[in-house]
Amino acid sequence: MLATEIASARETAPPICKGFPVILPGSGGAPQIARIVDGDRRQVVLRSWDEEVSSVHYVHAFDHLGNEMPGWPLTEASPGDPMNALLEPVAAVDLDPRFPGEEIVVSCASGNPETYCRPSAFHGDGSAVPGWPPAETIEVTAGLGTTAVIVPLPGMWLGSRIAVLLSRLSSMLSPDATKTAYLHLLDAAGVLVPGWPRTVTRTGLFYYSDAAIADIDRDGAPEIIVAMDGVGVEAIRLDGSTAAGWPVSYGAEMPSAPVAGDLDGDGQPEVVFIQDGQVWVLTGDGTVAPGFPVFIPLPVWYFPIVADLDGDATLEILAGMFNPSDSGSGGVAVWRRDGSAYPGAPFMADGGVFAPPVVADLDGDGRAEIAVGTYNTSAAVFHSDGTLYAGFPQRLLPGRGITGVLYGPAVGDIDADGDVELLMTTVNNIGFTEETRLHCWDFPGADGTGQGSWRAHRGDAWNRATVVAPLVPSLPRPSGGVILLLSAGVMLGIAGRSRKWSGRR
């Protein structure tokens, strides 16, 4: 279906947020919405790096008017320790109750294969959280792409314990040599948790994907679900042991980063991933769910997502697609929870969709919208029936070099006015000079945090890549949720293994 209809004549295009777009030199990454200072408003945090200034890496924080927050941007993990941040989303969590607001956890990657860098955590004023960067023994080797993940630990009060998951490959040199990949789980002070690290030793270039965090066996504690080349998808318990029935693999290619959600409504999350051009859904013991796998019409660059698209309290599976022979074509594929095609899908955009979409109720009608960016640097917003939202698609940088939306958007109420903003970054390559723009639209819906939504590149500000149960029908609208027991983790994977997989972390 080519979605060219407008759902309602009464609908109007959302205005651009005051103070946006924000223009940054170099390449910018996935936006994340967090409350890093005291108050009702939220801030937008993202990474960038500028090749024109000796490849300096930054972490930015902007207020609701597009102004850089005091103490930001950050360029050092600690005094004299350069920031080597890749462009995956940061994580936001209140890990230091002595300070107002949430802290920002930032992991890293060094450009030199023989040097190391360390993940960091910062207060809202840009100062380092005590104990960060962690000890030298868990420094991360060069070339590792990173995403921070907030992991709920059973029996812990909010902010009382933070677990940090780190992946390390011993070296990127000599691809035929024997190497060891590590998974480290550390507490808030950087101390290794008993049962960790996990290690895999073999030849070649291999790495862990980003993690999904979900209690797939209903024992009250979440599992850490990751993918690795030659291993498949694995579920790891908090004590470092492998869950029963895992790992599993259903193809020659490395699986995409997994996501999780309760698709069949039994209160137990399923694991969803892409491997060899098919969407797979596995139950908690690693068996294939009925109706799967299903084939994908076009390749997927990153990973699938799960969300309640039509407000019926069940989850759909969505994936952004692109045509490798024509980056100007692509769209969003959608399947029901049983593997059947969603009515009218795929929803075709005016360009290849490399980044994962976000799904949230942007207009306040009780049903979700899908927001995506394309490689042609346009933004598209679809209603749940595939019709386009008024004013979309929007070409964001017409006629200016090679451009693209390479990371998922984010949604949330950044100005505390009760409705929702949509944030998206575009990268514009003019010759050898790159420019990033952070775009913002003001939609009339609620703040986008309803159950069943997918609100950022890896699902939410905690990057858990999981939609939690139970879901309730969206009419009347749910009033929101309660944040329960939290801790934090960092999941890293090597960027640049191949162009095909460098984004699928």
Image (cartoon, rainbow, N blue to C red):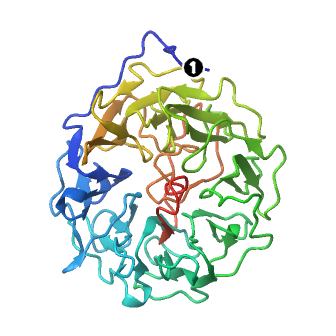
Residue type, mark 1 in image? Leu
Secondary structure of residue under mark 1: loop
Relative to residue 197, is residue 343 drawn left or right?
right
Instruction: Say above or below: 17 vs 246.
Output: above
Q: What residue is disc 1 on? A: 2
Image-quadrant location for residue 217 = bottom right
Image-quadrant location for residue 237 = bottom right
Percent x, y of residue 1: 62, 20
Residue at the extreme left: 70
Residue appearing at x 25%, y 62% in the figure: 58
Total residue callouts = 1
Relative to residue 298, is residue 143 drawn left or right?
left
Instruction: Say above or below: 463 vs 415.
Output: below
Q: Which of 205 and 57 is in front in this view?
A: 205
Q: Residues within 10 Å of mark 1 (few under 14, many from 20)?
A: some
Residue appearing at x 39%, y 31% in the figure: 378
Tell me, yes or no, if residue 16 can be seen here. yes
Residue at the extreme top: 9
Residue appearing at x 42%, y 11% in the figure: 10
Instruction: Say above or below: 183 vs 257.
Output: below
Instruction: Say above or below: 71 vs 500.
Output: below
Percent x, y of residue 7: 51, 15
Relative to residue 334, is residue 119 drawn left or right?
left
Tell me, yes or no, if residue 417 can be seen here. no
Q: Which of 159 and 28 is in front in this view?
A: 28
Percent x, y of residue 16: 27, 30
Percent x, y of residue 465: 56, 56
